[in-house]
Image (spheres, rainbow, N blue to C red):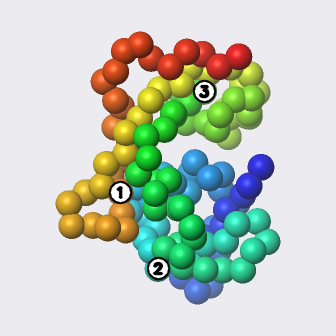
Amino acid sequence: MTKWFYRIDARKEVGPVPSSQLLELIRNGDIDGETEVRKDDSPWVPARLVNGLWKAAGTPGVAFNCPFCSSVIERPPTKCEACGRAVAKAVGQLVQHTRPKGKAESWTKSQPIQAKPKAPPLQ
């Protein structure tokens, strides 16, 4: 699984973080286009230069929550980082990510799409 790293400043490296968490950091405005990021052992680059990263941050997606503690998790099967339990199945929720007015490099928090029916459970 791909792991991302980012720099808060020139000295402090954060990571590894999963792709979903990196996208959430972009949507929340914690990572902007000038924040240096790298994937696995790749060289550091400004986030704005990573092909498809901003587009992915604004694309509707499916969010999964741990059935034991409700924390956001990667697509199952996975291990919940919050409670440490193995998650084989989870119900996904379709979410739409919106861009705040006047901010091209930052995103708001995910908002659930009011659509029925909800995504079926993953097998």
| Residue carrying label 2 | 34
Between disc 3 and disc 2, the foreground one is 2
Kind of residue at disc 3: Cys
Residue at the limit of the structure toward the bottom, as seen here: 10
| Residue 108 in the figure: left or right of residue 74 | left
| Residue carrying label 3 | 66
Q: Tell me the number on the disc at residue 107.
A: 1
Q: Are marks 3 and 2 in contact (CB under 8 Å)?
A: no
The mark that comes first in sequence, 1 or 3, is 3
Q: Secondary structure at mark 1?
A: loop
82 vs 63, nearest the viewer: 63
Residue positioned 43% across, 71% down in the render: 32
The mark that comes first in sequence, 3 or 2, is 2
Quarter of the image containing the C terminus? top right
| Residue 16 in the figure: left or right of residue 67 | right
Kind of residue at disc 2: Glu
Q: Secondary structure at mark 3?
A: loop
